[in-house]
Amino acid sequence: MKFCIQLSADYPDKSYGGDRVYRDMLDQARLADQLGFDSVSVTEHHLINCLMMPAPLQFAVKIAASTQRVKILTSVVVLPLHDMRVYAGEVIAADIFTDGRLYLGVGRGAFKYEMDRMGVSMDETRAIFDESLEVLQALLTEEEVSWDGKHYKFDPITVMPRPTRPGGPPMMMAVLNPEGIYLCTKRGFHIQTTPLSGNHQLLHDQVNAFNRAKQEMGSEGEKLTLSLSRVAHLATDRKDRARKIKAAHHYYGRFDNVFTGPGLVDRGVIRELSCDTPIEELGESLMVGTSEEVIEKLEPYAELGIDRLILNMNFGLDAQETLDSIQCFAEDVMPHFA
């Protein structure tokens, strides 16, 4: 099982400065590269201070210039917010600038507040995403493309420059539903998913759907991977663990506001509401604890054959604490799964 650090921008205090937030994230990427993590990942979100990254491809290029070998995943870019005729060229350029280390994770968008303010109705995101994905794949694989669909209509064009890798960078599909995982795997996509708040039955269903599709594909599916996203942090003792779970509980109070809640945002700052999950239940589901506790929580994931675990260690804690957790994870946890 390989490990990825999600460079998740949590920015509860605007006085801290966006430049410092992104500098902290770059420090995390450099450290992950030095310590042998497989990859780092960046989100795409606009207009809010949680998971704040309006320019993931630009940041991927910056990361590549500051690291040596780590893969760079988008987790994920929101296709309905982009014009594929422009975006295809940006993807190709970013793939070139990152020396072929880019993995393009794509999704339809999850935050209603964000999508509404950007002029895209959540009711239409599935249809827009599906057509956008088809257009993007066509532009990356065919030299001349014309289109006559519901959301795109254009005469023949050729995106320049052409991809240096056939079809552009590997694509990863963000999908939660097991049946969706099965269908996307059958189409040849790598998969990014999450069992939400530690729902073990959902996790098993997700893994089984992925494995069933790979089995049916035979040799064509051998290289496809399943990546799983979880909040994680290393703690020194029980008191430290409780403090970090409390910070995660506050983080989810903001996250739930824009993910499943009313979307209350004040000048870019998400209003903290009560977290939907009780703190004791959240503490059990998160990958937060001592090295021994985290290893114990990770072992079922390794037994299930998860290819990559994407670890979000940035949820309102001090920047140095996040770096310390990355270091501790690499030294004490990763060798157990080497």
Image (cartoon, rainbow, N blue to C red):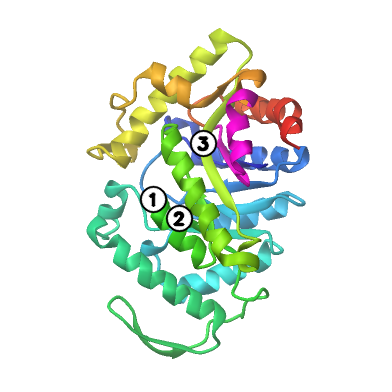
Residue range in magenta is: 295-313
Cβ–Cβ below 8 Å for labels 1 and 2? yes
Q: Which residue is most to the top? A: 239
For the residues carrying marks 3 and 2, which lies nearer the camera in this image?
2
Residue pointed to by mark 2 = 181
Q: Where residue 271 is drawn, which disc sits there?
A: none
Disc 2: CA contacts within 10 A as few (<14), some (14-19) or many (>=20)? many
| Image coords of residue 118 (percent x, y) | 30, 57
Image quadrant containing the N terminus = top right
Amino acid residing under circle 1:
Asn
Relative to 41, is 212 above or below?
below
Mark before the other along the chain sequence, 1 or 3 = 1
Q: Name the residue at 71% across, 50% down.
A: 70
Is residue 104 visible in the rendered image? The answer is no
Quadrant housing residue 127: bottom left
Q: Where residue 177 is drawn, which disc sits there?
A: 1
Q: Name the residue at 58% across, 36% down.
A: 301
Mark before the other along the chain sequence, 3 or 2 = 2
Q: In the image, is 161 to the left or to the right of 11?
A: right
Amino acid residing under circle 3:
Arg
